[in-house]
Image (cartoon, rainbow, N blue to C red):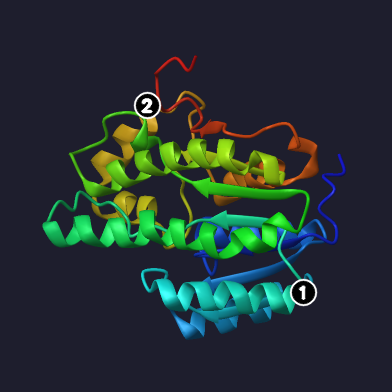
Amino acid sequence: MDLGLKGKRALVTGSTRGIGRAIASALLDEGAAVAICGRDTAGVEQAIKSLGEKGKVVGASVDVANGDALRTWIADSAAALGGLDIVVSNVSAGGGGRTSIEAWRQNFEVDMLGTVHTVEAARPFLEKSGEGAITIISSTAAVEAFRVPQPYNVMKAGLINYAKNLSIMLAPKQIRVNTICPGPIYFKGGAWENIKTNMPAVYEGALSQIALGRMGTAEDVAAATLYLSSPVAGYVTGANLILDGGFTKRVNF
């Protein structure tokens, strides 16, 4: 199926590794031009060099908790790409059972405000697109009790509510907004690799709850993101896609 992404201009936050990088790579495979960012300068440079073999890539080192720096990068990226059609907010301060007040602040500033700054900075460019699409990466930790009462769960839940309200507000501007809730996603250097190595019982316990019998991959999330970002999903907005292989057990009405 031709997703109609050739020539589209996309921006992906947190995209030098893991899920974000897989999304950027998949967009390039479909013929889109992509702006990427990460906190580590060396990581950004390596990603640009590698991904650049697939197509046009621009990028910079950005801390999404720094709203001014994030907004500047988005404006610069839009200028470099000639506009924006697709925005993927894929940032997180992580979970790991962190419950300190500092963790609450960090998750709020990165997960929640980082997404808000991204959307607000990209919105003027998306309004000019005529086929704007925003996809926000949340988590199944947002829709069911998960481990402990931690800021990660709460902020990811807040993103779903934020996206739904955005989808109604931005629809007249022909900007669609959707969220994806990945379940356990395994990739090299990711949280679940660390859990498998250091807490094998926790890893095996999670794996046993996945109906399909395997962890998800970053490419699984990328495929879903490409669909929601594409004109093929042109009538889909305000949706929250659970992508978890049957890990969660709630019934979604």
Q: Which quarter of the picture shows residue 26? A: bottom right
Residue in the image at 26% along x and 40% along y: 202
In the rendered image, residue 191, in percent from the top left (x then y), is placed at: 36, 54
Q: Amino acid at mark 2?
A: Gln
Q: Is residue 223 visible?
A: yes
Q: Is residue 39 visible?
A: no
Q: Note whether 133 is above or below 57 in the view shown.
A: above
Q: Residues within 10 Å of mark 1 (few under 14, many from 20)?
A: some
In the rendered image, residue 20, in percent from the top left (x then y), is placed at: 55, 59
Residue in the image at 67% along x and 81% along y: 49
Tell me if 70 is positioned left or right of 1 in this view.
left
Closest to the observer: 108 or 37? Answer: 108
Q: Label 2's element?
A: loop
Q: Amino acid at mark 1?
A: Lys
Closest to the observer: 252 or 126? Answer: 126
Tag shown at residue 56: 1
Q: Residues within 10 Å of mark 2 (few under 14, many from 20)?
A: some
- Tell me the mark number nearer the camera, choosing from 2 and 1: 1
In the rendered image, residue 147, in percent from the top left (x then y), is placed at: 22, 37
Q: Quadrant of the N terminus?
A: top right
Q: CA distance from mark 2 to mark 1?
A: 40 Å
Q: Note whether 140 is above or below 116 in the view shown.
A: above
Q: Label 1's element?
A: loop
In primary-sequence order, the first of circles 2 and 1 is: 1
Residue in the image at 54% along x and 70% along y: 16
Tag shown at residue 209: 2
Closest to the observer: 5 or 68? Answer: 68
